[in-house]
Amino acid sequence: MSPLSSIEGLAEAASWAEHVAASLTAGHTVVLDGAADLNVVLGLVQLEAAFLDRGLPYRRALSPSTHFLPASERESPSIKAGDVHCMVVEETDAHPSLPTSEGPLIHFVPVGASIQMGREQRSRTGALSPALLCALVAEHMAPSGPRVRLVRPWVLLAQWGRGALDASYDPWYTVLRDHLCEEGTLRVANLAEVETLPSNLP
């Protein structure tokens, strides 16, 4: 498994993830917190896989989907002494910088990041999904974890689920897809090459 942290352009996020991973494995009670929305759960499952691979205890604290309870109406989490809350939050707009990696509340939010792409190495800017940040932390916690490896391709689904591809080009989707394909985790095929298709496809 080729680490996601080896992707050019993710050095700062990988360093942040290393600090977060150290905090989560320092013996605190860890609570995985977030709304019951697909992109949030795709991030939480990355962290959960790492905890299972490491044999570390954790708790879940899922709240209702934002379709039923808007983020503006949510109460702040009640954090007990000795707890560390990992709160995965999916937002439309990307934050300009990574959140703090210390303290009892660690946020996983969309973060703007640039990468050099193409023959001319032009700078392209997009948003790293919260699930990608979770996956970076997970690979620091359990680099060879079988569960971490199993769920890692779901990061691509979370990146796609942010909706940037509906309106424009998402460089991070392309970079992640290429990385997962090159390491053999994912195979991209056109529909003509797929032998078994769901019966409800047009």
Image (cartoon, grey):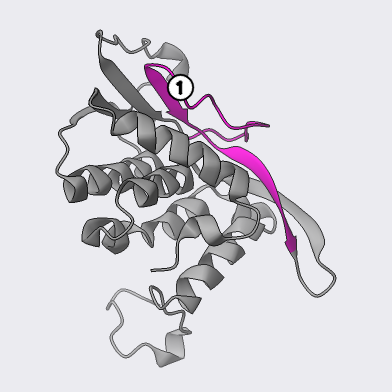
Q: What stretch is highlighted in magenta?
A: 90-116
Magenta stretch: helix, strand or loop mostly: loop
On the picture, is 188 further left or further right than 144? right
Quadrant in the rendering for residue 123:
bottom right
Q: Can residue 100 be seen in this view?
A: yes
- Look at the image and say whether residue 102 sits in the magenta stretch: yes
Q: Which residue occupies 44% across, 75% down? A: 183
Say whether residue 146 is left or right of residue 6. Answer: left
Q: Mark 1 points at which residue?
A: 102
Q: How many labels does the image show?
A: 1
Q: Give the quadrant of residue 152.
A: bottom left
Q: Whole-percent x and y of residue 19?
A: 45, 34
* 57 or 77: nearer the viewer: 57
Q: Is residue 112 magenta?
A: yes
Q: Where is residue 32 in the image (x, y as percent from the top left)?
A: 28, 30
For mark 1, give the secondary structure: loop
